[in-house]
Image (cartoon, rainbow, N blue to C red):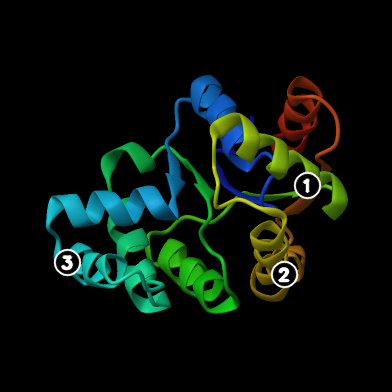
Amino acid sequence: MSATRLLLLGPPGAGKGTQAERIVAEAGIPQISTGDMLRAASAAGTEVGKQAQGYMSRGELVPDEVVIGVARERLAQDDAKRGFILDGFPRTAAQAEALDRLLADAGVALERCIAISVDEEELVQRLLKRAEIEGRADDNEETIRNRMRVYREQTEPLIAHYRKSGVLVEVDGRGDIDTVAARIAEARD
């Protein structure tokens, strides 16, 4: 049986969102991304959502405790009871530890952390191409490389955390979308 409580980890441009969409269609479980969670909580007017909105409206990063509160609310919703794909959460060691506690409190555990790896130069080229296609003027080489640096510093250490937990599977993210999807499907089994 394929794992249904998943975390997709990988640097910007690794294909997490694209692959998550495929798993959603195949497994019928929700993709839960940080941005979507924050926007939904804000729109719903929950207490945590109001806190998040305050930070977002000022253009500030939403602190861990607020992100964790929003994640707690989102993971408690009915559609996440059968499983979920986390994309963009957790991003830091503190968020990973909070997620572990959150899931333990709910009596479930993360079944797989799928870490998608791609060479940084290939990622930069992918993101520059995507920026050109989608007209993202703010996605230039300097901002892309900064996002890579932030990923290496803050999120990449989570690979060791999930390896230690025994749920990590590393997947080569090079190749076409179908090839990577096949590798991820194998990693879920």
Up the image or down, 49 lies above or below 138; here it is below
Q: Which residue is painted at 69% across and 45% down in the image?
A: 13
Residue on which disc 3 sits: 50
Callout 2: helix, strand or loop? helix
Residue identified by numbered label 2: 149
- Nearer mark to the viewer, of 1 and 3: 1
Q: Nearer the viewer, residue 128 or 54?
A: 128
Q: Quadrant of the C terminus?
A: top right
Labels 1 and 2 touching (C-beta < 8 A) = no
Within 10 Å of the Cα at label 2, are there few (<14), some (14-19), or many (20+) other Cα atoms?
some
Q: Nearer the viewer, residue 179 or 176?
A: 176
The numbered dot on residue 65 is none
State whether residue 147 is above or below residue 55. Answer: above
- Element type where label 3 sits in the image: helix
Q: CA distance from mark 1 to mark 2?
A: 12 Å
Task: Identify residue type, mark 3.
Answer: Lys
Q: Quadrant of residue 163?
A: bottom right
Please tell me which of labels 1 and 2 falls first in the chain: 1
Please state which amino acid type lies under the numbered disc 1: Leu
Q: Nearer the viewer, mark 2 or mark 3?
A: 2
Q: Position of residue 106 (x, y in %)?
A: 37, 60
- What distance separates the C-alpha of mark 1 from that of mark 3? 35 Å
Q: Position of residue 59 (x, y in %)?
A: 35, 69
Which disc number belongs to residue 123?
1
Going from the N terminus, do you reach mark 1 or mark 3 first?
A: 3
How crowded pointer 3 is (Cα within 10 Å; few <14, some 14-19, many 20+) is rated as some
Question: Residue 169 location in percent, x, y?
Answer: 78, 49
> From the viewer's perspective, is 104 left or right of 187?
left
Q: Earlier in the sequence, mark 2 or mark 3?
A: 3
**Callout 2, which amino acid?**
Arg
